[in-house]
Image (spheres, rainbow, N blue to C red):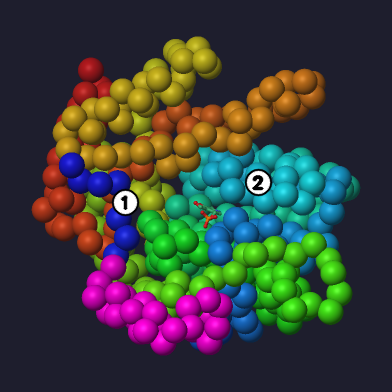
Amino acid sequence: MIPHSKPTLNKEDALAVADIITSGYISQGSAVEKFESEMAEYIGVKGGAAVSSGTAALHLSLKALGVKEGDDVAIPSYICPALLNAVHYIGANPLLIDIDNSSYDIDPSDLRRRLTKRTKAIIVPHIFGLPADIEEILNIGIPVIEDCAQSVGASYKGKKVGSFGICAILSFYATKVMTTGEGGMVLSNSDNILERISDLREYDHKPEYVVRYNYKMTDMQAALGISQLKRLDSFISKRRNIAGLYNKRFSELGIAIPSNPEKEHIYFRYVIRNMAPEHQSTRAPENKGQRLEEDLKFFEDNGVKCMRPIYKPIHKYLKPVLNSDSGLEGFPETDRAWDKLISIPIYPSLSDADATHIIAVVERWQDRTKT
Ligand SMILES: Cc1ncc(COP(=O)(O)O)c(C=O)c1O
């Protein structure tokens, strides 16, 4: 079975972590500081504050921006629940936004339509490694937290994502573009935000008490991060090479993913869209998604592990709450994406032979959906 995702680890990574262990200083220390400054330099911002996860990075970013209980925070519905959790940790309300039907990123016009007076921040994920329409969103004038958990190294008009918003977050979970096992970081040009996050991530030796967290990254993780960062550009070019193979064949089949000359995709995920018409028209809403389970099984039976790129949209989790709040509009593009998108394997260690096998299985799947 070709796995859906896989970290790219080598002996240098292991030696870097072993060095920290033999040094005897394993918690947050000088390796974390080094990792923060190297990561900030790579993205092109003033500094970074490393934390224990991408979720912790989102939580502390909202706190550092002064978002409070009762405020609204805009997030796309087509995203993992980490964003919803961070908003709820603050006691704020998630303001769900639909996505663009070709990039799958947050839709700026739907965002403008749904904004409220209480909206204090917008979290903008650059989903699957493809930058969102960040300039248009910044023009709205509400503070933007860029979520680069899936897009470290991607760029918009030649500038790396993560350098546009008031701050940006990264995740270094095992199967992300680069990893520290678990981990995250907030990047910013604002000293004030970085100082606030550095203060909130650790609770001890503080002259005054406020609620703080234990969200620290360890030097063991940071050493792995530094080692991975050295190879990040090569990881991305391998992803692009595989995407090149997929794009070539899938554009002939009419299922290639969109490209945009202003946006440099890093292909964290390669998603294909089921083009069978009954997917969008003949199924009752409650049965939508069922066909996709059959598709995933087809791929698995043919030795390729595929997944829904987003397990379940947020409005589907919140459905009972949304139903009681009458008058709320739906999320048609999010529903469509959930019903039709399949994420196929793409990662630096995927061999050409595996990529060729995956292409052949996709071709068979396409033929099958036509019948
Ligand atoms: C877009 C996005 N934001 C945030 C997160 C949360 O990151 P973590 O798992 O490190 O908490 C993820 C993780 O999958 C993600 O995909």
Amino acid tagged 2: Asn
Which mark lies nearer to you, 1 or 2? 2
Residue sitting nearer the eye, 355 or 205: 205
In the picture, residue 51 is in which quadrant? bottom right
Q: Residue at x 56, y 64 (%)?
A: 52
Is the C terminus in the top left, top right, bottom left or bottom right quadrant?
A: top left
209 relative to 369 in the view: left or right? right
Could you tell me if residue 284 is visible in this image?
Answer: yes
Label at residue 5 = 1
Q: Residue at x 35, y 31 (%)?
A: 274
- Within 10 Å of the Cα at label 1, are there few (<14), some (14-19), or many (20+) other Cα atoms? many
270 relative to 120 in the view: left or right? left
In the image, the segment drawn in magenta is: 9-32
Q: Residue at x 59, y 69 (%)?
A: 216
The stretch drawn in magenta includes residue 64: no
Residue sitting nearer the eye, 204 or 349: 204
Could you tell me if residue 168 is visible in this image?
Answer: no
In the picture, residue 147 is in which quadrant? bottom right
Q: Is mark 2 within 8 Å of ligand 1?
A: no
Residue 370 position, x and y percent, is 25, 22
Count of picture labels: 2
- Within 10 Å of the Cα at label 2, are there few (<14), some (14-19), or many (20+) other Cα atoms? some
Residue 163 position, x and y percent, is 60, 73
328 relative to 38 in the view: left or right? right
Residue 12 position, x and y percent, is 27, 79
Labels 1 & 2 near each other (Cβ < 8 A): no
Q: Residue at x 71, y 54 (%)?
A: 122
**Cα separation between marks 1 and 2:** 24 Å
Is the N terminus in the top left, top right, bottom left or bottom right quadrant?
A: top left
218 relative to 133 in the view: left or right? left
Disc 2: which residue: 85
The stretch drawn in magenta includes residue 31: yes
